[in-house]
Amino acid sequence: MDYQALYENATHQMEADAAKCVETGKRVVMGYTSDLDVVLEWSGEAFSRIARDFLAEEPRYAAGDRIDSMEDFARIVLHFLAGGAGGEIDIASPEVCDYLEQHFETAYALGGTCAQGAAALGAVGFPVTAYVTDRSKAVCERMDRAGMRLYANGRVAPLAECASGELPVKHIILQYPKDYQLTVRGRTYTAPVSNRLILDFDTIHKLLPIEPGFLTWCEENARNIYALCVSGFNGILDPAILAKRLDELTRHYAAFRAQSPETPIYLEGAYYLNPEVKDLAFEALARSIDILGMNEEELVEHAARFGLETDKEDLASILKSLDCLLARYPAKGIVMHTKDYSMYYGAELPGVDFAKGLALGNLLSGTRARTGRYGTRKDCLETLKTLPLSEMGLKMAAALERADTFGRFVSLVPTRYMEHPKYTIGLGDTFTAGMLTAFIR
């Protein structure tokens, strides 16, 4: 496949697709969570000091661990850094938050998959409707784009009319660079790739409140929605609270589907704070939605729970794990995004241009990695000129030609690769935004 031509055509198609949304009044709709990210500017000196002062044992992390002290912070963060992994961890100590904000330079950014995805689509000219949990002035200002609307207080309105006046919900983001090296307790640790950790000091998303009126609005307007993208379940810790939300939402998704069977429901995954919650969420939601979205680290975790080891550099291993997941979670398909390629695996859906969606997801994500912001169409064109196709992604594409796909439809597109990204925060959420354009038919 001529991937350069695919990218160029998809980029030029954005304007026509956005105009179609304006003309028809149909929208991509996204929910459910938002927050204000407190981005810690990386300081190797500050982190080295933390490791020297607080690392009391070998770095380690077990599913469900939370940060109650700076000793926990040092142990857990160094574990992720040494593996080049991203993740999300609960902070239970305000003193840890205070310490980090005092010892790192900070900046503020938009957080939450649907909030970031809506902002990314808005930046390239798409009108979007969203529902978000944090409607503080700080969040609304960072989401605001021409054509952007929120559902709040029983109606859809411009963001300026929806701001709540409340203080923002804060998530602390620590982004570490590739090749950072630290020697502590007689051992040297090196970050093999750039990645980020999300540290949540947050009570609202443990409950995931959703206005019932928004669910009713979605059902009543289902035929005017190109795709319904949902996320935010990963912050819930209590299985009983999740069970209540799932009961409410599975009934809602059934009612939505009854009104518009052709409108896809897209669940974008994330790092779950409680593995038990993750199991419950995927078991229930996979039967109610159409597309599961995840990155390769999430795929590896899911497959491991079913006794399947995944080699992230071997396409045959990846396809086997994807097939295993679809057998367990009977959605129509899975979209997986990585730094080197993105891929759809599942049923071929009529009228859905998966290659276009994957290319635009890669492009929006690559542009954010390159510029540090939600890119405009002009920024995206510049990315096409400056970032090459990933060599690993091209190897995966070549391997697909001879791979066993287990009878499933597969579309794979190499990313526009950047060895040292300027920004690693929200890249998956920005990818999801571009991917959703596949459903604008």
Image (cartoon, rainbow, N blue to C red):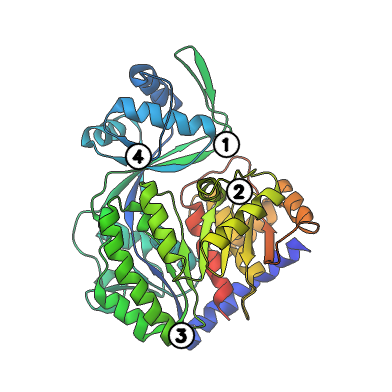
- Residue lying farthest to the front in this orientation: 307
The 10 Å Cα crowd at callout 3, few under 14, some 14 to 19, many 20 or more, is some
**What residue does disc 2 label?**
339
Disc 3 element: loop
From the top left corner, tell me how far across and down residue 380 is, in percent.
60, 61
Q: CA distance from mark 2 to mark 1?
A: 10 Å
Disc 1 element: loop
Disc 4 element: strand
Q: Quadrant of the N terminus?
A: bottom right
* Amino acid identity at mark 3: Ser
Residue nearest the observer in this picture, 279 or 66: 279
Give the vertical position of 80 relative to 11 (above or below): above
Q: Quadrant of residue 378?
A: bottom right
Q: Quadrant of residue 116?
A: bottom left
**What residue does disc 1 label?**
193
CB-based contact (under 8 Å), mark 3 and mark 1: no
**What residue does disc 4 label?**
106
Disc 2 element: loop
Camera-side mark, 3 or 4? 3
Q: CA distance from mark 3 to mark 4?
A: 45 Å
Q: Mark 1 or mark 4, which is nearer the start of the sequence?
A: 4
Q: CA distance from mark 4 to mark 1?
A: 22 Å
Q: Is residue 161 left or right of residue 352?
A: left
Residue at 21 percent of width and 64 percent of height: 164
Camera-side mark, 4 or 1? 1
Q: CA distance from mark 4 to mark 2?
A: 26 Å
* Amino acid identity at mark 4: Thr
The 10 Å Cα crowd at callout 2, few under 14, some 14 to 19, many 20 or more, is many
Residue at 77 percent of width and 53 percent of height: 399
CB-based contact (under 8 Å), mark 2 and mark 1: yes
